[in-house]
Amino acid sequence: MKKNSKKSIALVFVALVCSAAFALDPSKGEYGAKPVKVTASNTLIEDANSPDKYGAQNLIDNTYKSWAGKGVGTEFVFDFKSEIKIYGITIRNGYGSLGYYLKNNRVKSIKISSEKQELGSCNLPDTPDPHCINFLDSPISAKQIKITITGIYKGSEFDDTCISEITFLDSPEYCYDYYKEKEFKYDSWRGNLFAEIYKANSKKARKDASGRCQAYTAIDFESDTKWTTIQEHLHNAIYPIGYRGLNKNYSIFLMQNGAAVIEWEKEDVSSLITHFYIFDGKSLIDAENNPIFKSIKSLKETINNPSPDCTYVHFYSHSNVFEINYTKFLDKSLSIESAIECKLIFEFDGSKFVKTSEERK
C-alpha cells in the first residue's frame, strides 16, 4: 500500500445501529474514552525503519492515518485504565486518505467481545463516513474490548486491509445526530475536494459560509502543524452525502482515481440538478457530457422543468446510491388522493450510474 506503488447487528443484547455525525461540546472535555493501550495481531510493515507507520496507534489518533495489515482473523485489543461504560463505538472504515480508500480492502464485518463475554457480531457499511454501533439499550461495562475482523470488502489494487479510526463513546449524548466528533485531521485529497467545491460556488456563497466553515482553502491537510475545523453540515461531507452550507448541495461518490460529483439545489417545492463534475484528486472538471452520468442526465430536463402533474422533487444519496423522489399527480385537481409517490434508484458501480429500480406507491 505504498503511495508511490502504493446494519445488520446480531448482538446478545438489543442494540440500535446508526450512521451519524457526532458533535463535541468543548466545555465537556474529551470526546469518547481513549484507551491507554491498543494492539493489533498483525501490522503491515513496508519499511523496516518505520515499523509503526501503519500501526494500531493510528486507530486512536483522531487523524486520517490508518492501521493496515491482514484481513479476516485480525484482532485488535483496546485496554482502558479502569472499567468504563461504553454506549457506542464509531468506526471510520478503510484507508483514511480517500484517494486510496477503494484501492485497499475495507472491513465488512466484525466480532466484538470484552474481557467478560462475547458481545456479538456486526456488519459495517462500505463507506469512509464514521459509522456508529449504538449500545444505548445495553451499555457495555468493560476494561478491555477486543474487535476481530470476520469479513472484508476487496480493494481494487492492494490486498492490505485498513481502518482509519475507532472511537469508544462513554456518554449517551455522543450517540445522537446532533453531536459531531471533535476536530478530525483530514487528508489533503479531501481538502482539495472541499477547496474545489468552494471555488465552484459563487462569491456570495463563500462569504455567507465563511463564518461557519474554515477548512475550505487549499491548505496542506497533511501538515502536522495545520489542523482543520469543519463545522455544521460540512463536517462529514465525504461520500456520498449531501454537502450543505453553501448555496448548492453536493453528492460525492468515490471512484478508483477520483470522485463523481452531482451538484444540486432546492428551489421552491422542487430540487434541481444543476451540474455534474469529476474530481481527479486535485480539481473539479466539468463533466456535463460525461457518460458516467448518462442515465441521470437523461432525466435532468424533466427534473429541472417538472410538468404540472409532477412536482415535489427531492434527492437523497447514501452508500453508492443516488435517489430521486418525486410526487406525481394523476389529474388536474392536484389533490393528495390523486397523487402517487415515485422513487428512482441509481447505483454507482465505480465507473457509471445505473438505474436499478423504479418504485411507485
Image: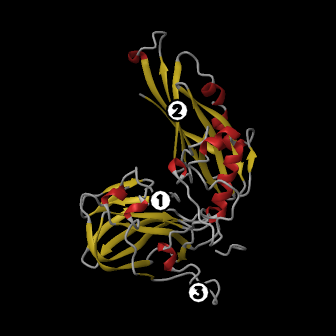
Q: Horizontal and vertical percent for residue 159?
A: 59, 73
Q: Residue at x 40, y 18 (%)?
A: 336
Residue count near mark 1 (Cα–Cα under 10 Å), binned few <14, some 14–19, many ≥20? many
Q: Quadrant of residue 223?
A: bottom right
Front position in the image: 60 or 56: 60
Q: Horizontal and vertical percent for residue 342?
A: 48, 29
Looking at the rendered structure, the kind of residue marked 2 is: His
**Distance between the Cα atoms at labels 3 and 1?**
27 Å
Q: Horizontal and vertical percent for residue 206?
A: 66, 44
**Distance between the Cα atoms at labels 1 and 2?**
25 Å
Which numbered circle lies on residue 72? none
Which numbered circle lies on residue 130? 1
Which numbered circle lies on residue 51? 3
Looking at the rendered structure, the kind of residue marked 1 is: Pro
Q: Is residue 117 left or right of residue 272?
A: left
- Sequence-first disc among 3 and 1: 3
Residue count near mark 3 (Cα–Cα under 10 Å), binned few <14, some 14–19, many ≥20? few
Looking at the rendered structure, the kind of residue marked 3 is: Pro
**Can residue 294 be seen in the rendering of this structure?**
no
Q: Is residue 46 above or below residue 190?
A: below
Callout 1 secondary element: loop
Residue count near mark 2 (Cα–Cα under 10 Å), binned few <14, some 14–19, many ≥20? many
> Mark 1 near mark 2, Cβ–Cβ under 8 Å?
no
Residue on which disc 2 sits? 314
Q: Is residue 241 left or right of residue 120?
A: right
Quadrant for the C terminus in the image: top left
